Amino acid sequence: MAYLTDKDEVVNQFTVGRVEIEGKEPSYTPDPGGKTEDIVPTEVIPKDPQITNTGKNDAYVYVDVSIPIAKVITVDAQGKRLNGGSAAETELFTMNEVSSRWTLMYQKRTGDSMIYTYSYNEILAPQKTTLPLFQSVTFANIVEGQLEEKQLEVPVNFYAIQALNTGEGTNVVQQAADAWLKYVNQNDGQAGAAAAPLSDVQTLQNEAGETPESEDSTGQNEEAEAAEQNEETEAAGQEES
């Protein structure tokens, strides 16, 4: 007996996504040689690291900032020498107006630098830009005659991780932190390895379910909250343009 038959087929086509970001500091304007020359104590240098998602997928985004450390003599605002006038190891730059839209995940000393690693508190959609992590840095108030002609650097690294199926937790901050640990494991020893992936204190806080945040960053975040509305307005204007 002959049977009437038919066959159909459904082919699902999938295009692999792409996580891609652009890190920038639009307010930083170096001298013609590409550096900021001849800085002086307490000088404020515009520097506003931020990230644009130029890829096709939602992403958790992160910034780490390396602050150089040196053994120097410093003074307070009235010119009085601190630490009894003795040289002490000092972070040579301070981040100003740290945005409360970023969370400090880790803080770790590596060599002669203190590295701060922040995650953004929101999932960054394609073509969107974060608020700046901070607005400027201030050079330490050191006594003259120290570090003259020494080249100092404040390197900033930008990272992104796909948001889908990577981070576990009840909010974006926890999810981003969990995804970061996976990023560290995946890129250990590779070109994309994190500058300073973990610090013991923050790791213990994560295990306890606490949100890692240093006392210094808490104070800076509180000071920055008053300016958040202005930042949001400016960021919205940039995106519309």
Image (spheres, grey):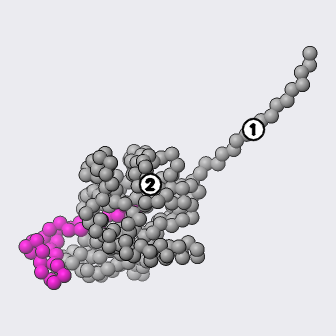
Residue 201's disc is none
Q: What residue do we see at 43% from left, 60% from top? A: 121
Q: Is residue 54 left or right of residue 96?
A: right
Residue 7 lies, in percent from the top left, at 82, 31
Left or right relative to 12: residue 182: left
**Residue 213 in magenta stretch:** no
Q: Is residue 87 magenta?
A: yes
Task: Work out how far the residue at label 2 is from the one at label 1, CA to CA, in angstroms.
Answer: 37 Å
Within 10 Å of disc 1 (Cα), the crowding (few <14, some 14-19, many 20+) is few
**Picture coordinates of residue 24, whole percent (x, y):** 46, 69
Residue 10 numbered tag? 1
Confirm or deny contact between disc 2 and disc 1 (CB under 8 A): no
Dividing the picture into quadrants, the one containing residue 231 is: bottom left
Q: Amino acid at mark 2?
A: Val
Circle 2 sits on which residue?
172
Q: Point out the stretch of residues depicted in magenta.
A: 63-91
Q: Is residue 218 visible?
A: yes
Q: Nearer the viewer, mark 2 or mark 1?
A: 2
